[in-house]
Image (cartoon, rainbow, N blue to C red):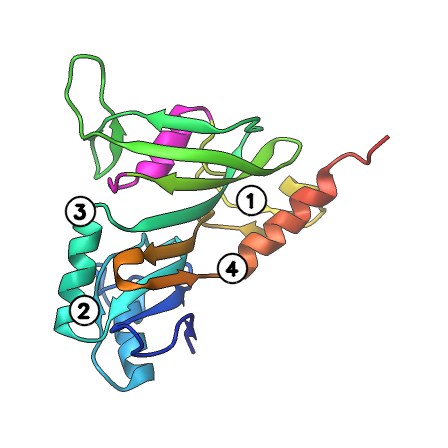
Amino acid sequence: MLHVLTPVGATGLIAVAKPPGMLVIPGTSGPDEGECLRDALAAQLARPVFVVHRLDRDTSGAIIFALDLESTRRASMAFEHGQVKKRYLALVQGVVRGPLDIKLPLIEGRQRKMKVAPAGLMGKESRTLVRPVETFVKASLVECEPLTGRQHQLRVHLMAKGHPLLVDHQYGRRQPLLEKDLGGQGDAVVLGRTPLHAASVEIEAMGFRAEAPLAADLLATLARLRALRPAAP
């Protein structure tokens, strides 16, 4: 059962908490990819829903669907014209000591990856605001506000500033974090996906806002990181 974050039909839109590991729409990897979020929500509501925007498969958190074609059009135009305010939470490597205003143009690289445009090449204008929320021994919980909407923007910008996500099979550490990596003794996986969470999304022109609580794996990772902090003197 999907966690519905907003009343159904109040604005022609609905937001749900996307679980990590679930595709928004059907992919191309075959039957093992599981049910997609759009179809699961349509079955739960017993009515069609329309995709307004997407989140990467690993990303958890608030995502919007429309309930009719006119709402789809209005919401899609808001995203296209940069009229949507999005806030993400991310667990990154290293200690982020202060706010960052990252303005680095992006271009497409190999294997469907994005990268910062080298000097002399014109990339797509990209800007991300980052602020630390909580810091640990060798990691930080940060809040990210993308002011543009480029593919993999947050992940590439954070990596470029020396703070890749704690796990990222494309742009950083490929191996999952185990209990023993976070101060424990066992080999159980604590975090096996990119720790990126869509905390809130807002379309002010449509009077629509949704917030999503952190997913269970991110809460478990935060608990481990907090336990690793040295006690105050």
- Disc 1 marks a residue whose amino acid type is Leu
Mark 1 vs mark 2, CA separation in Å? 41 Å
Q: Which residue is mark 3?
A: 81
* The disc label shown at residue 55, or none: none
Does any portion of residue 21 appear in the rendered image? Answer: no
The segment highlighted magenta reads 148-162
Q: Secondary structure at mark 2?
A: helix
Q: Left or right of 79: which side holds 128? A: right
- Disc 3 marks a residue whose amino acid type is His
- Image point (27%, 79%), residue name: 42
CB contact under 8 Å: marks 2 and 3: no
Q: Secondary structure at mark 4?
A: loop
In front: label 1 or label 2: 2
- Image point (78%, 34%), residue name: 230
Q: Secondary structure at mark 1?
A: strand
Q: Position of residue 232 (x, y in %)?
A: 82, 34
Q: Which residue is mark 4?
A: 215
* The disc label shown at residue 71, or none: 2
Does any portion of residue 140 appear in the rendered image? Answer: yes
The vertical placement of 225 against 104, above or below, is below
Mark 2 vs mark 4, CA separation in Å? 28 Å
Q: Which residue is mark 1?
A: 177
Q: Quadrant of residue 55?
A: bottom left
CA neighbours of label 3 inside 10 A, class few (<14), some (14 to 19), many (20+): few
